[in-house]
Each structure stands twice: as structure tokens, then as C-alpha cells.
Amino acid sequence: LRAGGALFLGKATVPEGCLDLQTFSEAFGVTNNPYNLEYTCGGSSGGSAAAVASGMVPLSIGSDLLGSLRIPASFCGVASLRPSCPLLPPEGHTPPAFLP
């Protein structure tokens, strides 16, 4: 992305192990839903969804094995795209991606 001219503005919060339906980390605390602070923004890419929904950034990147993009996007009222496994190489994914 950097080689293509992308500018990175920051890093979003993800839960420990990147496997949860909320977004909390010991390092940064809770990321709430930008429309109602009493609600969760979902997880595990909830920080990314909250940043897009609040207008902080026009788009964000994340990964999705079991709904990590789709769930936060639906909680925050934004859209997400999940490419199929062979189209996006799984190398370097945390936790390790499983292939069908």
C-alpha cells in the first residue's frame, strides 16, 4: 500500500488474539460505537469500522476469517469487502488463516 502512495494515519484497536465480538485491548481500552457510546462497535476490526463511521478516515483495512470485518461494519453502519482466500494470500495473517 505504501508503494502505491497510501498514507497511514494510525493503528486501530483490536481485541487480544483478534478473536472477539467486541473491541477491547489492555493497551488502549474499549473502542465504542461512534453513534452510541453505550454500544460496542463489534470486533475484531471494530476500531477500523468506528474510524470510518466517525469520518476520521475514508477507508480502512482489516482481515476477516469469521466476521471480523462484516460484524463491525454492520454495527457501525458502514460497508466492508471480504476477498476470497485464494485471491488474497493468507501469509502473515494473525491468527493464521485456515484454507478450505
Image (cartoon, rainbow, N blue to C red):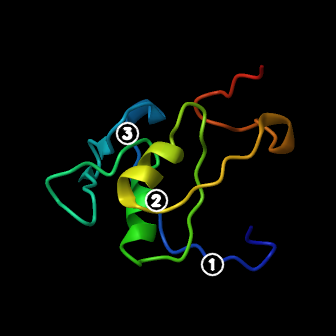
The residue carrying mark 1 is 7
Circle 2 crowding by C-alpha within 10 Å: few under 14, some 14–19, many from 20: many
Estimate the x, y position of residue 60 in percent, counting from the top left: 56, 64
Among the two numbered marks 1 and 2 on one chain, the one whose residue lies closer to the N terminus: 1
Residue at 27% from the left image edge and 58% from the top image edge: 33
Q: Quadrant of residue 20?
A: top left
Element at label 3: loop
Judge left or right: residue 90 versus residue 87: left
Judge left or right: residue 3 versus residue 34: right
Please state which of residues 76 and 32 is positioned toward the viewer in this rendering.
Answer: 76
In the rendered image, the residue lying farthest to the right is 86
Estimate the x, y position of residue 25 in percent, counting from the top left: 30, 43
Quadrant where the image shows the N terminus:
bottom right
Please state which of residues 27 and 93 is positioned toward the viewer in this rendering.
Answer: 93
The residue carrying mark 3 is 15
Mark number, residue 48: 2
Element at label 2: helix
Estimate the x, y position of residue 74 in percent, counting from the top left: 43, 51
Give the CA separation, mark 1 to mark 2: 15 Å
Q: Amino acid at mark 3?
A: Pro
Circle 1 crowding by C-alpha within 10 Å: few under 14, some 14–19, many from 20: few
Q: Is residue 45 visible?
A: yes
Residue at 41% from the left image edge and 61% from the top image edge: 77
Give the CA separation, mark 2 to mark 3: 12 Å
Estimate the x, y position of residue 35 in percent, counting from the top left: 25, 66
Among the two numbered marks 2 and 3 on one chain, the one whose residue lies closer to the N terminus: 3
Judge left or right: residue 49 versus residue 40: right
